[in-house]
Amino acid sequence: MTAPGFDYDLIVIGAGSGGVRAARMAAQYGARVLIAEEYRVGGTCVIRGCVPKKLLVYASKFHEEFEDSAGFGWSRPAAAFDWSKLIANKDKEIDRLNAIYIRNLNAAGVQIVQSRAELRGANEIYLVAEERTVTAATILIATGATPFVPQNVPGAHFAITSNDAFHLEALPKSIVIVGGGYIAVEFAGIFNGLGVKTSLVYRGEQILRGFDDDLRNALAGEMMKKGIDIRTHADVTEIARSGAGLAAVLKSGERIAAGLVMYATGRVPNTAGLGLENAGVQLNGKGAIEVDAYSRTRAENIYAVGDVTDRVNLTPVAIREGAAFAETVFNSNPTAVDHSNIATAVFSQPEIGTVGMSEADARAAAKRVKVYRSSFRPMKHTLSGRDETMLMKLIVDAESDRVLGCHILGPDAGEMAQLLGIAVKMGATKADFDATVAVHPTAAEELVTMR
């Protein structure tokens, strides 16, 4: 299927997870597709997000594994860690994944252009690196989001973001992480686990706003047990030079000295300089591209998927939105993505896995709610001796018996959340959970034995 009078049927701006999926599927449906990417193919998740972050999480956990092994009869010389070797191995894996993404696009017949792309009209794209304009019947914006660094904090330019954390030449002896979301708590665990003195400064009342309160409180407690200094109700008003390092100056006047300061205060839709105004694409109050249920913008032929739309900012959601776009536009199969009950994980230490409503949200939405909660020591730590508590929680609609939310803090919580997501999406009841025979001995059996 081709659109006469245009260079391409589809131009995709941004070769991240959502853009790549959309481009490949559209090409497989017969479209002539160009995808423009100014950095590397694979996007934030693959290149400088989820994938390298989890590799660093794995690395940071080994010091506890070595300690825990003593309770199981193991003894070994003191372990030594090499940051440069970790980063080199991480880079090798990212290069491998980047090459796979490129190979898959090429195999589908998608033309890849390494260039920034800007809208010059509803059907016109200017490729900056090649200094030429190309046209398409349909345009998809999949430029994702970029780390937010406040412009009104003096010295904020001294700080790094998560993008920079993957390319540090050496580990600092200490770090202050500003923020309380999942990126902040994940990197706090990474740096702390690798031996860096870590402080987390957050202006809110508790970390992980939007998650279930029991999870938030329990995670904060476990992080502090591990030696992370968490400061809530704390605003950073300045980042100043301090000797050979930096100091985060708090509103209270306190100064926290550190080798590095990292901003992890969220991400903002990556729309700056795209020329959206030239094509009639509208932004909402948060600076995200406005789209309908089928990812169409106010401009009839322009669509947007992924974090740039600020719906549910998760890689699998972007992939699902990209696929739905291709089905809708290039396969005559109108497909809208259901953004409800999406399971997710936070690779904090300990890990979080969650799906569905928090207790607070459920109490606001349902007439009566039953809460089932279990807190216990993971079996492994009966011999390791580590002081760590696991938390599991089910939120149930008392009238329908439907499970509204499942929340887990502890080892392998993310893996459990993926499977729980199926049950919650299908509308499982507490009776369904109770009727399921436990797998013993596992932590997950607690989910079907709570009373």
Image (spheres, grey):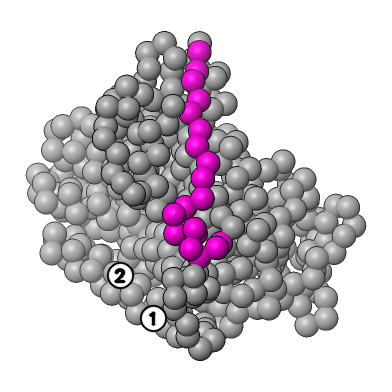
Residue 369, position in %: x, y? 50, 18
Determine the residue positioned at 56% across, 55% down. Answer: 388
For the C terminus, the quadrant is top left
Q: Which mark is residue 89?
A: 1
Q: Which mark is residue 375?
A: none
Q: Amino acid at mark 1?
A: Asn
Q: In this orientation, does residue 67 appear?
A: yes
Percent position (x, y) of residue 277? 48, 42
Q: Quick check: is 192 in the magenta stretch?
A: no
Q: Earlier in the sequence, mark 2 or mark 1?
A: 1
- The answer to which image quadrant residue 154 occupies is bottom right
**Rendering coords of residue 275 (x, y %):** 46, 49
| Count of numbered marks | 2
Q: Residue at x 32, y 29 (%)?
A: 433
Which amino acid type is marked by label 2?
Answer: Asn
The span from disc 2 to disc 1 (Cα, nearest Å) is: 14 Å
Q: Which residue is mark 2?
A: 98
Nearest the viewer among 435 and 211 is 435
Magenta range:
368-386
Q: Which dot, 2 or 1, sits closer to the camera?
A: 1
